[in-house]
Image (tube, rainbow, N blue to C red):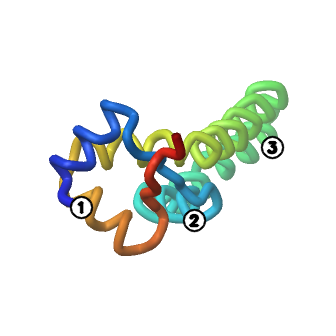
Amino acid sequence: MTHAEFVTAYARGEIRVEIDPQAAARSLSARLLLPFVMMPVLGAGVALALIGWIWTGLAVIALGSVTSRLIKRSAPHLLLQEALRDESAFGELTRSGILRIAPTVQ
């Protein structure tokens, strides 16, 4: 199925799109380099807590942890939107098996 056919069929509701949530979270985390972003954020939170800004440091740690989990939780929706917009992303997601297309059961 080509990208144009995919977009048209999805808009008409002719297909059902299945996205593996764990694989989507891993893929998006790797693409965004999420672990490498989280380490400095959490480190800054710990540093703030150690220099006496305890509540600010704890808030930064909590915000960093929650943000990471929210990004991973919303990964299937984000990747579906990207696949609808970008032909290369659609091809990559279907080749990797993260995005699967099934006809709608009527």
Which label number is shown at residue 50? 3
Q: Nearer the viewer, mark 1 or mark 2?
A: 1
Left or right: residue 36 versus residue 67 is: left
Of tags 2 and 3, the one toward the viewer is 2
- Decide which of tag 1 and tag 2 comes sooner along the chain: 1
The residue lying at 75 percent from left, 29 percent from top is: 59
Considering every residue shown, the one lying at the far bottom of the view is 96
Q: Which residue extends farthest front?
A: 106
Tag 1, which secondary structure? Answer: loop
Q: Categorize mark 3 by other alpha carbons within 10 Å: few (<14), some (14-19), many (20+).
A: few
Camera-nearest residue between 21 and 6 = 6
Label 2 secondary element:
helix
CA distance for labels 1 and 3: 55 Å
Is there a contact, CB below 8 Å, between mark 2 and mark 3?
no
**Quarter of the figure with residue 87:** bottom left
In this rendered view, identify the residue nearer to me: 39 or 28: 28
| Residue lying at 74% horizontally and 26% vertically, measured from the top left | 56
Mark 1 or mark 3: whose residue is earlier in sequence: 1
- Give the spatial CA distance, label 2 vs label 3: 36 Å
The residue at which mark 1 appears reads as 1
Q: What residue type is disc 1 on?
A: Met
Give the mark, 2 or 3, whose residue is nearer the N terminus.
2
Q: Which mark is residue 23?
A: 2
| Disc 1 packing (10 Å; few <14; some 14–19; many ≥20) | few
Taking 11 as reference, is 59 left or right?
A: right
Q: How many marks?
A: 3
Question: Percent from the top left, x then y, of residue 44?
Answer: 64, 45
- Which amino acid, mark 3? Leu
Q: Does residue 95 appear to the left or right of 44 in the view shown? A: left
**Looking at the image, is 13 positioned above or below residue 22?**
above
